[in-house]
Image (spheres, rainbow, N blue to C red):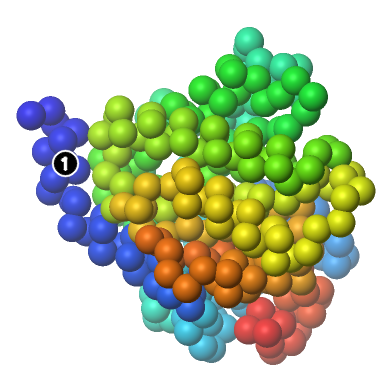
Amino acid sequence: MTKYKKIIKMNREELRSTAQALATRGKGILAVDESTGTVGKRLAGINVENTEANRQAYRGMLFTTTGLGQYISGAILYEETLYQNHADGEPMVDKLKKLGIIPGIKVDQGLKPLAGGLPHETYCSGIDGLVERAAKYYEQGARFAKWRSVLQITEDGPSEAAILESSWGLARYARSVQESGLVPIIEPEVLMDGSHHYDRTAEVQERIIQETYFACEKLGVYLEGTLLKPSMTCCGAECTDKVTPKEVACKTIDVMLKSVPEEVAGIVFLSGGLSEEAASIYLSEMNNVVNVTPWTVSFSYGRALQHSCLKAWAGSNIPAGQAALIA
């Protein structure tokens, strides 16, 4: 038996338990893993300088929101936040734990141009040294991880190179972090750019997700200790066809039922490209469409949970920011 299989066998129960806790029905995941540059753009939108103290103040406001744990099972952090203390000196991870929220960590190191792909296509970097990094994150209190690949629907894409790179990259990441005790959230994001109908989105998503789980099977990823973070099956942003939220919900659930193994603990949808309202309505419709699915259907939202909250906080108004987050 390989060293990896021994470790997975030893950690299997913990991985399953953490994944089930993250996938608790009625709760979702708060994505607060924006890089320093990205959070800087959000802060600039409310005329707040992008300093470590301001990032600490904003995230500290989120992580001390009374009652947040009733709705949020886990929070994905950026590395800075995982090692950061609140302004009162208590570690941020301890603030989350007090609310009953599981700390997680973004472990990828960003997108880079994909050799052999189309000019705009990328691969996700960060596999080198990931097992060791993940072990340090576990020591610091993280219990799950996130890794994002990005694919785009075009007239001639996504290319075969992009699909295979995404699926095997996600599988290698999942195996690596499980080896260190972290539950992997597997995120194959399909961008909403384009004028395609959602039937085309469905066709592409099915291929991508099925290919990802084929790679996971080949690499021995323990599926009960994983979550999937996909896009919703929407039309492209420039598509002129009108589809209802219920149609989007039905199409999305259909894709998931065809593509996602029942062993997976939960599906937590991303909100990229959608407004707060649309992301909420589509998810609500999904849970109305089907009474029983093999996995929990919930959310892992960043902007859709933080946009109004950030504006209400405005740099110093903690009660208003926290009220908007709970709302």
Identify the residue at the far right of this view.
Answer: 240
Identify the residue at the far left of this view.
Answer: 1
Residue at image x 55%, y 53%? 254
Q: Position of residue 41 (x, y in %)?
A: 80, 53
Q: Quadrant of the N terminus?
A: top left
In which quarter of the view is residue 302 placed? bottom right
Is 285 placed left or right of 30 in the picture? right
- At mark 1, the secondary structure is helix
Residue 284 seen in render: yes
Q: Position of residue 259 (x, y in %)?
A: 47, 43
Q: In the rendered view, tell whether residue 233 sits above or below residue 58.
A: above
Is 178 placed left or right of 297 in the picture? left
Residue at image x 84%, y 47%? 237
Q: Position of residue 214 (x, y in %)?
A: 38, 31
Residue at image x 13%, y 45%? 9
Read off the residue under disc 1: 7
Q: Quadrant of the C terminus?
A: bottom right
In which quarter of the view is residue 322 placed? bottom right
